[in-house]
Image (cartoon, helix red, strand yellow):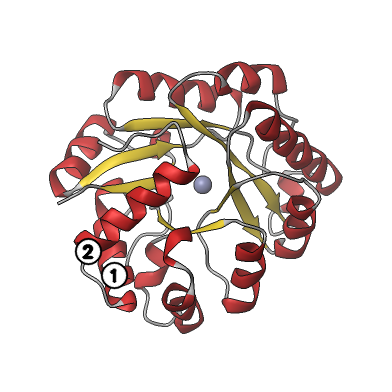
Amino acid sequence: MAGLVDTHAHLEELADLEAALAEARAVGVSDVVAMGVDGPSSQRAVAWAERYPGVWAAAGHHPLNSSGPDLDLLRRLASHPRVVAVGEIGLDAVDEHRGPWAAQREWFTDCCQLALEVGLPVSVHIRGTEAQVWDALAACQGIQGVMHYWSLGWEWARRFLDLGFYLSFSGVVTRGSREELREVVRRMPADRLLLETDTPWGTPRGRSGPMQPAWLVETAQVVAQLRGIAVDELAELERANVRTLFTRLAPG
Ligand SMILES: [Zn+2]
């Protein structure tokens, strides 16, 4: 079977990275994109991508930081051949106190501009900020990317799809109560669908403890079932989408 790709994970949160990567490969998750949330974590993501086959990196600046992005560092990292995206970036209204709102918006715009400049897609975080993020992306002509950890209903899904964005589904779809979200999985175009774990968050139904890349399989099973296709077919489809969006990523 073609391997699944975990398009968004925070590997620094794993207690035993090598064991988690080996377990992921053993169950059919061939590739993982390690997100950066600030300068140092983006550097670590690049180091893992150099060290471990199947690991790719993103360089970014999470909205819940207390200070702004080191754009020179992110620009340098973005030129690395195993850096496939600018991320994680976005806007977060829930823990606004952790990242002042005016500053968050400025950082997000700066990182989107950087992505355009270096020709990479973005991996975008929203939490209570879909309208503001949509406005910012719509104003950033030519930007491409993925809305990570997609959890909203069809109306917002359609709006981000109309912008040309991909939607990435996490373990949240395994929770039966999220019918609105499952509707999005069923209705959205196949050529914009991606999968992720957002390790260590988004643990699937029936599991406990921090999420890990291997559990992407459970999300894939639910997504495949909702779309009425086999997991193999979903894996092929996701790999095609990965190659189109993250052009530097050659899945193993
Ligand atoms: Zn994340």
Q: Is residue 5 above or below residue 127?
A: above
Crowding at label 2, few (<14), some or many (≥20) Cα neighbours within 10 Å? Answer: many
Ligand 1 has an atom within 8 Å of the beta carbon of the residue at disc 2: no
- Which residue is drawn at the image coordinates 65% and 65% (left, top)? 162
Are the residues tagged 1 and 2 within 8 Å (C-beta)?
yes
| 145 displayed left or right of 114 | left
- Which residue is drawn at the image coordinates 64% and 63% (left, top)? 160
In front: 233, or 84? 233
Q: Residue 48's spot in the image, x, y percent?
A: 37, 23
| 81 displayed left or right of 100 | left
| 170 displayed left or right of 214 | right
Q: Is residue 131 above or below residue 246?
A: below
**Which residue corresponds to mark 1?**
224
Q: Residue 47's spot in the image, x, y percent?
A: 41, 19
- Which residue is drawn at the image coordinates 81% and 50% (left, top)? 139
**Which residue type does callout 1 highlight?**
Ala
Q: Is disc 2 placed on a helix, strand or loop?
A: helix
- Circle nearer the N terminus (1, 2): 1
For the residues marked 1 and 2, what is the alpha-carbon distance in whole angstroms? 5 Å
Whether residue 35 is visible to the viewer of this picture, yes or no, is yes
- Which residue is drawn at the image coordinates 74% and 44% (left, top)? 99
Q: Residue 224's spot in the image, x, y percent?
A: 28, 70
In front: 64, or 142? 142
Quadrant position of residue 71? top right
Q: Is disc 1 placed on a helix, strand or loop?
A: helix
**Which residue type does callout 2 highlight?**
Val
In the rendered structure, find residue 231 and report the number of the disc placed on it: 2
Whether residue 210 is visible to the viewer of this picture, yes or no, is no
Crowding at label 1, few (<14), some or many (≥20) Cα neighbours within 10 Å? Answer: some
